[in-house]
Image: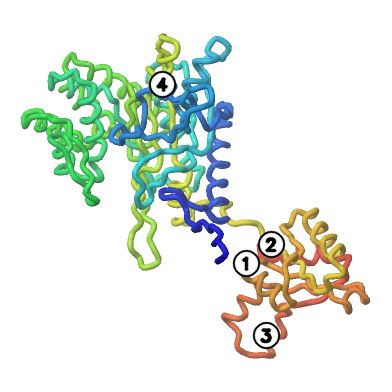
Amino acid sequence: MAKEKSFRPKARRPRGFEDRAAHVIRAERALVSAASAVYERWGFEPLETPAFEYADALGKFLPDEDRPNEGVFAMQDDDGQWMALRYDLTAPLARFAAEGFQDLVKPYRRYQFGEVWRNEKPGPGRFRQFVQCDADNVGASGPAADAEMIALAAEVMRSAGLNDDEFVIRVNDRRLLDGVLESLGSADETRRMRVLRAIDKLDRLGMQGVELLLGQGRKDESGDFTEGAGLDQAGRSRVLGFLEASKAGGSRAEVTARLAGTAGETVARAGVEALEEINAILSALGIPEELAVFDPSVVRGLGYYTGPVFETELLATPTYADGSPMQFGSVASGGRYDDLVARFTGQQVPATGFSFGVSRFAAALSALGRLEGADAAPLVIVVAADKARMAEYFAMAAQLRAAGLRAEAFTGNGNMGKQLKYADRRDAAFAVICGEEEFVSGTVQIKDLKLGAQLAESITDRDEWKEQKQQFSVPRAELVQAIVSRLSARG
């Protein structure tokens, strides 16, 4: 009888998820550290909330209502209640604020970073799991708190290594668009959200794509169909006319003056007044006109925004190895969401916030070479020349680590040649070699791998190669000092 074949699962990564390598993780950590330092300086306190929230706590504020699963990964607990992985950090904040509302010092200023999950259709640069970093102010009404968030966003961009001419923050107030929707004479919330989602895709789809989404709908390149808002020709023309007018540009004061002339007594009037106050505060904080501009076409897709909204767009254009440009677009966003906590308390609680996707932003900064701290500290590999002396090799590595260096004793298999090849592949700065002869003489050999790589590219003369002393011997007691001195000499 033939032996039954054992099952071997195929090694495959789930669609829409990614494995992040060491250099990516370090870049993201550096970015989170820079942003967190800004939040701390501005008086925000850190908070962590669980990965899961009860599905009813997320309610209608789901990220993509076009998907049949409503955009979240959900499971039923043993008590019959449905839980879902958080799709952002704002909805959990609203639950947290509502649950302990009486005990919070208000306004409550918090920042948080962590993984979020979205059950959406994956695509290039669009993943189902990624890291977000947020700052929020719960309990502060009025445009002053919104202006602070915009200024905070500018400082985060600068702290991440961007110059003022490499990004722009585009600001709007959702009530301006609500005024346009009022003029269409429709109170249908589904239609309203579809109109807003259509406008939000202006930069990606252009006027023609937006018009399709305002009408009967649009089929994308993959063949998927997105149902439109169903506006008639007059309604589409009204929305598209507003978008055309909003692109006229000008200073912040000029934009608000132009909007004030068209707002009338609709809800848009409150939006104009909010932008006027935001302009005054941004000007007082020294935020330049070209750094924070008013752009009434900015929507922000999520349904919970109720007032000022903004997006941070990357102007600097990194390139691929072949010189073609990388497209990043908006790397951070925020806005006011006064109704989110009220879902739990029945009482409106003003709130405003700022958020960026860590992976996307870090990738852009790394491509531009603007993310300081993304590189790991130099690594030292202690070669295991004699497997019987592993305890002593571990002691050497521990001594190097105690001095603040990254170090490891080689624990794999292979002779010295294979171990040095391993050190090269790990991009190590130094290899420490101590065989029988060195143990007898009380010395160690230090191989400067970075210098060796440089010499291999620039020197062809054998005598000149020898003069560079890529490998040298020092007393065992001077091991740490010798490596530290070499690193210091490199600056």
- Mark 4 or mark 3, which is nearer the start of the sequence? 4
- Residue designated by label 4: 144
- Mark 3 or mark 2, which is nearer the start of the sequence? 2
Is the Cβ of the residue at disc 1 closer than 8 Å to that at disc 3? no
Q: Secondary structure at mark 3?
A: helix
Quarter-of-image position of residue 305: top left
Q: Residue at x 42, y 33 (%)?
A: 286
- Residue designated by label 1: 427
Q: Quadrant of the N terminus?
A: bottom right
Kindly identify the amino acid type of the residue bearing the numbered disc 1: Asp
- Mark 2 or mark 4, which is nearer the start of the sequence? 4
Res 64 visible: yes
Is 255 placed above or below 407 here?
Answer: above
Kindly identify the amino acid type of the residue bearing the numbered disc 3: Trp
Q: Is residue 480 left or right of residue 358?
A: right
Q: Position of residue 111 (x, y in %)?
A: 53, 30
Q: CA distance from mark 4 to mark 1?
A: 49 Å
Which numbered circle lies on residue 444? none
Q: Which of 222/113 is in front?
A: 222
- Residue designated by label 2: 379
Which residue is most to the front? 1
Q: Residue at x 40, y 66 (%)?
A: 321
Q: Residue at x 88, y 71 (%)?
A: 475
Q: Secondary structure at mark 4?
A: helix
Q: Secondary structure at mark 2?
A: strand
Q: CA distance from mark 3 to mark 4?
A: 65 Å
